[in-house]
């Protein structure tokens, strides 16, 4: 193919296919038609493409963790059907259906309802027409490997799996305050969701046996025993969320994290040569992320500082003119860096291996100039860190005067815990006044770059710009580990293996 088509045109074809997720579109079509085996395949595909993609979300967490707060919001947000195994069981017992009567016999003896009965109820509900039309948020199932495998064999594969990890002590503490109203079926919490100040209601509240400490500990033990084998079946697009103090009273943080995750898509097997820009405010961690990604995947690492140093090393006129700006490329005359970087990104190693450009472009004008020179990224990742955090990272940064290794005085790695850092130096660009000026110049950078590269707001829209949360203070230690920023790197890596995320928070 490469011998028959001009390389520039071939790259344009690849960029178009990647921008519109064509590989994943066709992969989804083939998977759907194979799974459903429709009698009229062409009409099925027409309907498949015309129909908006429905939610398919599984929420997994320890019993009594309070995850129902999350599922309620997800159901309302996506207008999806709430499928809860516990509610289905209670409904079946109240209606005295065949499955309900069988389940009741186990419940009354205090035994777990067998997998076969629970699976029958849940899979039957997931197969109904309203679920096919509106999608689902599934809770309380699967709880065992057999349940998970039965779901997968039915072709029910969640698009997103949200896994809550909460310490047992936090769950037991929360359970102590739970009260149940047997008349309305409403559950209250004495501290976080108290009942109305009504003597009648308060007088009839009860504490269910399932909410006592021995019962909760028993349920947690069963959960811990089964959850590894359940998650082993659900690896396609799963993320674990750890909240040491629980979900209750921390809902804003929880929802922020989850909606960010729900904008991602399953790992893709689409062939692509990555052309990645890592952007963000000064101090957001661009260099660390850029170097780590390039090293792990073999991409060429490019930055304003590196191209200037390469020109100095080559003794070129560019090196002579820009040498003074090696440690502060932002101050270089406008246009010079764009020319240098565009030239570097067009070299054979970048074309063959892909590239990671970090710390550039600074502005909308820089981005448009690169585009005019034929530099078109397929990922533009903004490392989202607030100005206070960036200020702390930069103003507390010191460098080893011999090796140039950086360290943040607020997050000293273990290998330097006993090292005298008094001789380590601060650079002029990390002075607090200079840092504040730099951050002020970049105040509108995110909005400007988003306009140039586009941000996906819906499945139908296109764009290559998206944000990744970048918190933590630590720099790298002697073993090239990232003690506090490793989560940022994990999120960036995960995004590169998937189609471009959708900013769901922009919709809701």
Image: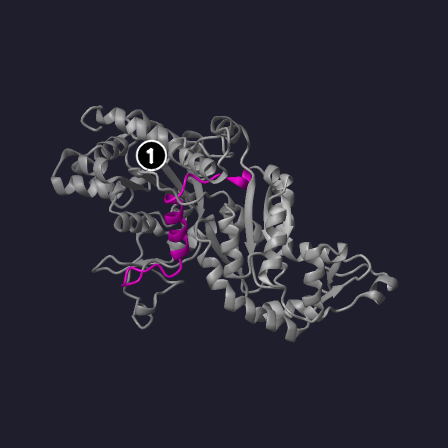
Q: Which residue is mark 1?
A: 377
Quarter assignment of residue 164: bottom right
Based on the picture, tell me whether residue 183 belongs to the magenta stretch.
no
Q: Nearer the viewer, residue 405 or 325?
A: 405
Give the left or right position of residue 279, taking residue 230 as reference.
left
Tell me if residue 484 is in the magenta stretch.
yes
Please report the bounds of the magenta region as a residue range.
477-506
Q: Residues within 10 Å of mark 1 (few under 14, many from 20)?
A: many
Q: How is the image coloured?
A: one colour
Against 205, residue 52 (above or below) is above
Q: Nearer the viewer, residue 46 or 471?
A: 46
**Rendered image quadrant of residue 312:** top left
Closer to the camera in the image, 212 or 391: 212
Q: Quadrant of the N terminus?
A: top left
Q: Position of residue 29 (x, y in %)?
A: 44, 34
**Residue 136 horizontal/vertical position (percent):** 59, 45
Q: Quadrant of residue 96?
A: bottom right
Residue 5 position, x and y percent, is 22, 24
Secondary structure beneath dot 1 equals loop
Q: Quadrant of the C terminus?
A: top right
């Amino acid at each position: 193919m490469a011998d028959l088509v001009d390389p520039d045109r071939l790259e344009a074809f690849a960029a178009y296919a990647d921008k519109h997720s064509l590989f994943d579109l066709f992969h989804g079509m083939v998977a759907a038609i194979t799974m459903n085996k429709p009698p009229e395949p062409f009409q099925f595909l027409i309907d498949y493409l015309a129909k908006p993609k429905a939610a398919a979300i599984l929420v997994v967490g320890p019993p009594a963790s309070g995850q129902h707060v999350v599922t309620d919001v997800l159901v309302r947000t996506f207008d999806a059907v709430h499928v809860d195994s516990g509610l289905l069981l209670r409904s079946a017992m109240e209606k005295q259906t065949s499955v309900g009567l069988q389940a009741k016999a186990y419940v009354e003896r205090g035994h777990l309802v067998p997998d076969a009965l629970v699976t029958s109820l849940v899979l039957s509900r997931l197969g109904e027409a309203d679920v096919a039309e509106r999608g689902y948020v599934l809770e309380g199932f699967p709880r065992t490997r057999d349940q998970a495998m039965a779901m997968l064999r039915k072709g029910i594969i969640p698009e997103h799996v949200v896994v809550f990890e909460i310490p047992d002590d936090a769950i037991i503490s929360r359970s102590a305050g739970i009260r149940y109203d047997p008349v309305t079926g409403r559950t209250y919490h004495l501290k976080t969701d108290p009942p109305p100040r009504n003597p009648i209601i308060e007088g009839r509240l009860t504490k269910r046996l399932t909410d006592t400490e021995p019962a909760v500990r028993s349920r947690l033990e069963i959960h811990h025993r089964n959850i590894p084998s359940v998650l082993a079946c659900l690896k396609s697009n799963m993320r674990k969320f750890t909240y040491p103090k629980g979900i209750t009273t921390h809902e804003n943080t929880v929802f922020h994290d989850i909606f960010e995750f729900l904008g991602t898509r399953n790992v893709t097997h689409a062939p692509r040569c990555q052309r990645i820009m890592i952007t963000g405010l000064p101090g957001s961690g661009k260099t660390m992320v850029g170097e780590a990604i390039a090293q792990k995947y073999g991409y060429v690492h490019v930055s304003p500082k590196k191209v200037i140093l390469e020109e100095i090393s080559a003794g070129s006129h560019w090196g002579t003119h820009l040498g003074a700006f090696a440690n502060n490329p932002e101050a270089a005359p406008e246009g010079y860096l764009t020319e240098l970087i565009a030239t570097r990104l067009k070299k054979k190693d970048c074309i063959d291996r892909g590239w990671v450009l970090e710390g550039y472009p600074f502005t909308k004008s820089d981005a448009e100039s690169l585009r005019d020179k034929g530099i078109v990224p397929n990922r533009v990742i903004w490392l989202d860190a607030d100005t206070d955090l960036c200020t702390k990272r930069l103003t507390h940064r010191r460098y080893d005067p011999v090796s140039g290794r950086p360290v943040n005085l607020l997050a000293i790695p273990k290998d330097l815990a006993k090292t005298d850092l008094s001789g380590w130096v601060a650079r002029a660009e990390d002075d607090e006044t200079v840092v504040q000026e730099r951050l002020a110049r970049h105040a509108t950078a995110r909005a400007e770059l988003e306009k140039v590269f586009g941000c996906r707001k819906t499945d139908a829209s296109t764009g290559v710009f998206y944000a990744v949360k970048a918190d933590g203070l630590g720099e790298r230690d002697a073993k090239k580990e990232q003690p506090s920023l490793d989560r940022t790197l994990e999120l960036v890596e995960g995004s590169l293996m998937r189609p471009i995320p959708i900013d769901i928070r922009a919709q809701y």
